[in-house]
Amino acid sequence: RIRLEAQWELARRESWPVLAAVACDTTLGPLSRLHAIWGVDQIARMNQSLEQPIKERLRGLLFDQEAVIRSAAVKFAGDRQDDKAIERIQELLEDQSARVQYYALRALGEFGDRSSEAAVLRVISEQAESDTAIRHAGILALSQTRSAEELKLLSQHEVEIVRRSAVVALRRLHHAGV
């Protein structure tokens, strides 16, 4: 509770350099660093003139050793549309952490990144059957990056879970054929 109040107060004061330093300090625990990332995100939402320097400062967290920090960094990059982070986010679809993969799928969907279709379909094919969160994120990515006509073409895909995911994505788009 105290950490949360401190996060909100520093965000209110727009003390983003302090929060960014905490977020990037690998000697601190993950919870402190997460609150710092969330606080910096609050500041970026409240003051768009600070968004670009904040993106640049936090981009390195996409390479952090802690999976929870990488996932928060991916979420931040996707929410803030950090187009300089797309290539790294695409790489994070291969991360060992399902949480990081989930947020990478969500971020690529938020970007509307069409260049990642093969990687997104591979993650859905390999993991969506056993991991409902990955399935959900994959469906969101498909619905945000593909037209209804493109999704209908996936009905011919060789992997059943991809076909089902495409149907659910069509449903999310309120397509008349579903």
Image: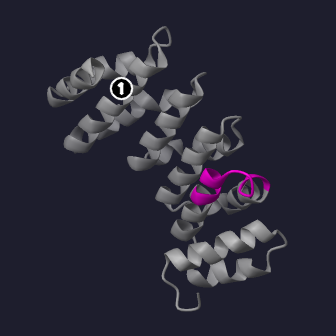
Relative to 118, 66 lies left or right: left
Quick check: 52 above or below 23? below
Residue 98 x %, y %: 65, 41
Specify the farthest residue to the top: 27
Quick check: 51 above or below 142? above
Q: Is residue 54 magenta?
A: no
Relative to 77, 49 lies left or right: left
Relative to 176, 80 lies left or right: left
Q: Secondary structure at mark 1?
A: helix
Residue under circle 1? Answer: 35
Quick check: 148 above or below 99? below
Magenta stretch in the rendered image: 126-136
Q: Overall secondary structure of the magenta stretch?
A: helix
Residue 89 x %, y %: 58, 43
Relative to 64, 110 lies left or right: left
The amino acid at mark 1 is His
Q: Is residue 129 magenta?
A: yes
